[in-house]
């Protein structure tokens, strides 16, 4: 290998863009020749020395947004949307007589009372995890949610709200703070209602899967709101668009939420479901050349492993060939 | 750096101000740091960040959720910085750059080290320098750099390899020169 090719390889490894094969290759090249090993170390040290400089403070985003939203009239637009119309009417049409004044006053009070709940509509909070692995967020009610890689959560409730509704895309583990109000997770296909519990939700375009670690939840499909499935600790259910939620058997109760700690327990689990878990956690594409292989049941566990070695172990277990046509794309072939 | 989903971009293009706020909070600081490096002035970079997002909001109808927003913002920020520098050249550099506020005493060794690195990076060919800076200082992935510079990820890889090799050579020369000065002058 030329020094230029080695430089390319080092950068791919340092920046996290290298595949398992490329990492192995670098280790091999390093071990083969002391001169090359010295060259690699020199480049690695140089990369470290060239870390981004911190020149003065960063950008004051809050102040910047305040100024920009004011310039663009976004703050006024938001105020206009939420301002009760009764107040405007009262301001514009001044009554001429005391009777009219009382009438307008009463009307304004009634309108204000009617519009007050709208006026106090809580703002939508958006949580996105863009970090590799999982990230824990605390919601305003004290509940915590662990978002998987690339997951998004929207909340729209505050202390006065009668119910706590959140919308989820991706994978999340919830630890709900019981406060007497229902807590519902809405996904593209499913609706998960709980009152104080710990549970795991995987919401993809195709389906919603719910696993309960503690407590009790009710799952229903968005299109069939009268069909409820109640889950208790250790139970896992799936909800697919247009179908009632179904209970999955042979699922290890320890599996719910273990992905947060980089642990995966697959016990008699169909390969296609294991693949779904791995795809959601690592943000990679995994194809099966023969889709029928997806029904094969596997029992295997992984702990704090990267996706490359996990895929290699899976391929070995199933006697399949593993290909990686590009970064973050894996293919299991017969 | 926070990544923003296609859904958020779609919402911005439909005029949803809360989605625009999410976009702003995700990218205002990285854009500021990028523009500060480009212009060498924090005040100007701050103005350009606001100008950048004003343009994004005004042209929100043209946003394509399928197109990576990060690449779009870096391209737009580069254009703004280039426009700014062009104006500055036309005005004959009448505007004196304000010195950055550093409350701490300058560390001469650190300054010398940074200066060497700056000189080494500045001496790289244009394409290699751009790729190196976007990777090392902005933390962009290969495909993102490829999107910003409108080149293939393979070309990014090649430029990066060449840049690192060259930087090593330049820095070795600079270090050797410093060593020479230390002992013989």
Image (tube, grey):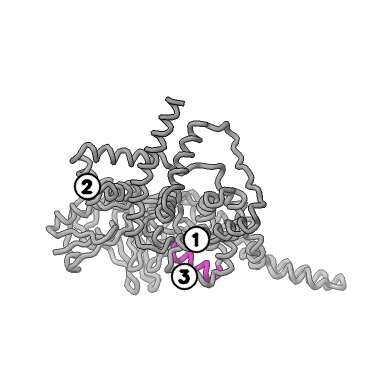
Tag on residue A24?
2
The subunit carrying tag 2 is A
Place of residue A194 in the rendered image (x, y in percent of width and height, measured from the top left): 41, 58
In this view, the residue in front, A110 or B119, is B119
Crowdedness near tag 2: few (<14), some (14–19) or many (≥20) residues, C-alpha within 10 Å = few
Q: Quadrant of residue B68?
A: bottom left
| Residue B165 placement (x, y as % from top left) | 33, 46
Provide the secondary structure element on which disc 3 rests. Answer: loop
Q: Residue at x 22, y 50 (%)?
A: A309
Secondary structure of residue under mark 2: helix
Tell me if I can see residue A176 in this picture. Answer: no
Against B49, residue A109 (above or below) is below
Residue B11 highlighted magenta (yes or no): yes
Q: Is residue A299 left or right of residue B111?
A: left
For numbered disc 1, what is the local secondary structure?
A: helix
Q: Calculate the distance from the C-alpha at mark 1 to the C-alpha at mark 3.
A: 12 Å
Q: Position of residue A286 (x, y in %)?
A: 25, 61
The residue positioned 21% from the left and 44% from the top of the image is A29
Q: Is residue B28 above or below residue A228?
A: above
Disc marking residue B64: 3
Bin the neighbour count of mark 1 within 10 Å (Cα to Cα): few under 14, some 14-19, many 20 and up.
some
Q: Is residue B44 left or right of residue B150?
A: right
Label 1: chain? B
Of tags 3 and 2, the one toward the viewer is 2
Reading the image, the residue beneath label 1 is B73
Asked whether residue A139 is in view, the answer is: yes
- Asked if marks 2 and 1 touch (Cβ < 8 Å), the reply is no
Task: Locate the C terminus of chain A by quadrant.
Answer: bottom left
Q: Which residues are magenta?
A: B4-15
Name the residue nearer the viewer: A143 or A2. A2
Q: Chain of mark 3?
A: B
């Amino acid at each position: 290998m030329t020094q230029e090719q080695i430089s390319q390889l080092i950068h791919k490894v340092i920046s996290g863009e290298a595949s398992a094969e490329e990492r192995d290759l670098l280790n091999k090249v390093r071990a083969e020749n002391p001169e090359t090993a010295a060259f690699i170390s020199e480049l690695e040290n140089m990369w470290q020395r060239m870390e981004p400089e911190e020149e003065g403070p960063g950008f004051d985003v809050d102040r910047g947004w305040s100024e920009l939203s004011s310039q663009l009239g976004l703050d006024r637009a938001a105020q206009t949307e939420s301002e009760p119309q009764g107040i405007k009417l009262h301001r514009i049409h001044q009554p001429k007589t005391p009777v009219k004044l009382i009438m307008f006053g009463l009307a304004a009070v009634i309108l204000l009372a009617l519009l007050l709940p709208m006026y106090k509509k809580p703002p939508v909070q958006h949580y996105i995890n863009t970090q590799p692995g999982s990230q824990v967020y605390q919601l305003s009610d004290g509940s915590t949610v662990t978002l998987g890689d690339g997951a998004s959560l929207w909340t729209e409730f505050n202390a006065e709200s009668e119910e706590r509704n959140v919308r989820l895309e991706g994978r999340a583990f919830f630890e709900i703070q019981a406060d007497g109000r229902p807590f519902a997770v809405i996904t593209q296909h499913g609706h998960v209602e709980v009152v104080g519990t710990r549970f795991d939700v995987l919401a993809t375009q195709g389906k919603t899967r719910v696993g309960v670690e503690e407590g009790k939840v009710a799952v229903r499909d968005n299109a069939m709101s009268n069909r409820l499935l109640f889950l208790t600790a250790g139970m896992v259910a799936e909800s697919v668009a247009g179908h009632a939620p179904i209970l999955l058997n042979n699922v290890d109760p320890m599996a719910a939420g273990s992905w947060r700690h980089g642990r995966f327990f697959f016990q008699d689990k169909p390969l296609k479901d294991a693949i779904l878990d791995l795809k959601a956690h690592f943000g990679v594409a995994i194809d099966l050349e023969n889709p029928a292989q997806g029904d094969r049941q596997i029992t295997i566990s992984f702990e704090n492993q990267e996706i490359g070695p996990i895929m290699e172990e899976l391929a070995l277990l199933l006697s399949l060939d593993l290909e990686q046509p590009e970064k973050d794309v894996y293919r299991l072939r017969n | 750096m926070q990544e923003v989903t296609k859904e958020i971009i779609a919402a911005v293009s439909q005029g949803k101000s809360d989605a625009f706020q999410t976009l702003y909070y995700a990218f205002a600081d990285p854009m500021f740091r990028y523009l500060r490096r480009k212009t060498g002035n924090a005040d100007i970079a701050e103005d350009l960040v606001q100008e950048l997002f004003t343009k994004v909001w005004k042209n929100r109808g043209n946003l394509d959720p399928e197109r990576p927003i990060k690449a779009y913002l870096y391209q737009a920020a580069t254009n703004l910085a280039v426009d700014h520098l062009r104006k500055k050249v036309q005005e004959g550099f009448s505007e004196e750059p304000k010195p950055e506020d550093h409350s701490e005493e300058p560390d001469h060794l650190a300054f010398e080290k940074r200066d060497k690195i700056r000189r080494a990076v500045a001496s790289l060919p244009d394409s290699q320098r751009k790729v190196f800076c976007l990777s090392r200082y902005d933390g962009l992935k290969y495909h993102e750099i490829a999107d910003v510079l409108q080149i293939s990820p393979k070309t990014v890889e090649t430029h990066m390899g060449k840049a690192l090799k060259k930087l090593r050579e330049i820095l070795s020369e600079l270090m050797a020169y410093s060593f020479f000065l230390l002992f013989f002058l």
